[in-house]
Amino acid sequence: MTTRMHVDLDALRTNIARVRETVAPAQLMIVVKDDAYGHGLEAVARTAATAGVTWFGAFDVRTGSAVRAAVGPVPRIFAWIAASRSELDEAIAADLDLGIGDSDLLEELAVAAQHAAVVARVHLKIDTGLHRNGVRPEHWSAFVDRAAALETGGLIEVVGVWSHIAEASDAEDDEARVAFEHAVAVARAAGLRPRVRHLAASAASFARPEFRYDMVRVGAFCYGIRSAGGPSASDLGVTPIARLDAAVTAVRGDDVHIALGGLQGLPTALRGRGAVVGTPAGARELRLVGLHESIVASWPGAQNGDAVTVYGPGVAGEVSATDLAELIGTIGEEIAVRVSPLIPRTYAGE
């Protein structure tokens, strides 16, 4: 047995169906940033496309181009980070939708579209208070006026208006939604007709129906990763699609050594936090996370080659990525994306 991540693509399909059912009539955009949250971009993208997903959230242009290669010409792929003219050219060549939240970038995109003799599809981003990126409200009116002029000139098509929210509290999110709706109204007053409004990610898309609008951007819940401090995966109706197994490399007294450490993505901060892992004899304490290997409390009959489930469905119950994340004050997605790409991924249900 070697250390590897097992990915259940049937579970992914089931989660996608659950998300789509929950957010309907809004469309699902499945987010596949960070190598599909560490699960493997190509396999996840192909599976989602065959399951009927028509929108993909790729974060950056490089990922968007890889998704296009995986799913073909039909699905829409949204990338919201482009940092250079060359990336804008690449996005146009890959037929991506681009999230634009900067006036200079909008002008550069118009030049790139004119050079390529195409109409670039654009989603304009308003900063609703998260300050991650996007156009500040005081500059929004001039921004959408300019976008309208570029659309009239045949250089861009304003497909949507979008933003991020913090999902830190209902009150803050409500304020963000008010700002978002005002921004949409200002865009329409400028003559734009955005067909796709998208604001919510996983948690808000399930808990706050009023945030769904025309489309939701869901990553974590499609992979069965629950929100830290939120409802359980079973309460959400989703299933973790990944199981991370580490091989036992040595048994020394009451210590079992496994081939997974900080360099493979397991946070060293888990030491002393009460983390447990699954073994053939049940849950055992995760005693130490080193750089190349970790130490687990032993069990009767432990031997080299045994599999220890670090997180995911296993023979000894289940510890989720979010369970581990909560012990160190982070989110389950961070645990998932930390897993080294050098660890093999195997797929069931292809």
Image (cartoon, rainbow, N blue to C red):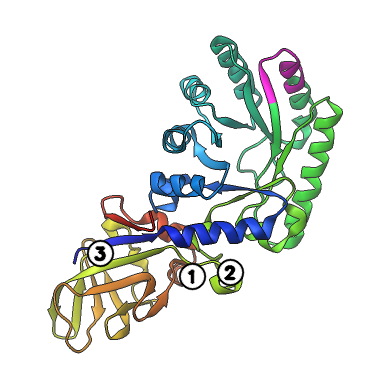
- Tell me, yes or no, whether the highlighted magenta stretch contains residue 151: yes
157 or 14: nearer the viewer: 14
Q: Amino acid at mark 2?
A: Gly
Residue 114 figure quarter: top right
- Find disc 3 in the rendering and name its residue: 260
Instruction: For marks 3 and 2, give the one nearer the viewer.
Output: 2
Q: Amino acid at mark 3?
A: Leu
Residue 167 in the image: above or below residue 49: below
Q: At x 78% / y 55%, what residue is drawn?
A: 210
- Going from N to C along the chain, the mark reached first, 3 or 1, is 3
User: In the rendering, at what x and y percent does residue 341 appear?
Assistant: 30, 50
Instruction: For marks 1 and 2, give the one nearer the viewer.
Output: 2
Q: At x 30% / y 57%, what residue is drawn?
A: 346
Residue 37 in the image: above or below residue 146: below
- Going from N to C along the chain, the mark reached first, 3 or 2, is 2
- Find disc 2 in the rendering and name its residue: 237
Q: CA distance from mark 3 to mark 1?
A: 20 Å
Count residues near mark 1 (Cα–Cα under 10 Å), then give few for <14, some for 14-19, many for 20+. some
